[in-house]
Image (cartoon, grey):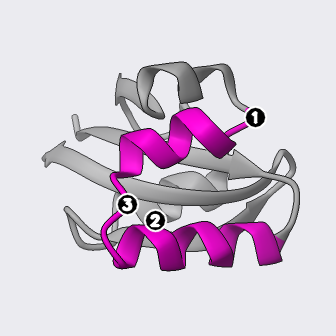
Amino acid sequence: MAKASARHILVDTQEQCEEIKAKIEKGTAFAEAAKEHSRCPSGQQGGDLGEFGPGQMVKEFDDVVFKDDLGKVHGPVQTQFGYHLIEITNRSE
């Protein structure tokens, strides 16, 4: 069964998400941005969500984590919880 590991940053608006993504693209560490901005408890661990399988996260999140490129920052991704930046750190089939 497929498994993935990812980090994310959860914020309230698409604009916040885009601003943080721009900072990361200019060199801010993803983990530091997560600690500073994410409203998910995982933010204190740099946004690390650990390992999970398909269906354990909401569909919009799964669609990114199990289909898009590793090592890139994806988003803004809107879910019922808010707007996410997602970095896929590992994936196995």
The image shows residue 14 at horizontal and vertical percentages of: 80, 74
The part of the image, by quadrant, that contains residue 70 is bottom left
- Is any part of residue 35 visible from this angle? yes
Tag 2: amino acid: Val
Amino acid type of disc 3?
Thr
Q: Where is residue 62 shown, x and y percent of the image?
A: 50, 53
The residue wearing badge 1 is 39
**Label 1 vs label 3: CA separation?**
18 Å
Confirm whether the magenta stretch covers residue 51: no
Of 64 and 85, nearer the camera is 85
Most extreme residue toward the left, as rendered?
92
Which residue position holds label 3?
A: 28
Q: How many marks?
A: 3
Question: Which SS does the magenta portion mostly show?
Answer: helix
Determine if the magenta segment contains residue 32.
Answer: yes
Which portion, as a residue range, is magenta?
Answer: 14-39
Depth check, front residue: 87 or 53: 87
Residue receiving disc 2: 64
Whether tag 2 and tag 3 are in contact, CB under 8 A, the answer is no
Residue 1 sits above or below residue 85 on the image: above
Horizontal and vertical percent position of residue 39: 75, 34
> Of the residues under marks 2 and 3, which one precedes in the sequence?
3
Q: Dot 2, crowdedness within 10 Å: few (<14), some or many (≥20)?
A: some
Tell me whether the residue at label 2 lies in contact with that at label 1, contact meaning CB atoms closer than 8 angstroms. Answer: no
Q: Quadrant of residue 4?
A: top left
Measured Cα–Cα span from mark 2 to mark 3: 22 Å
Instruction: Residue at 80%, 77% (x, y): give it.
Output: 15
Label 2, label 1: how far apart the Cα atoms are: 20 Å
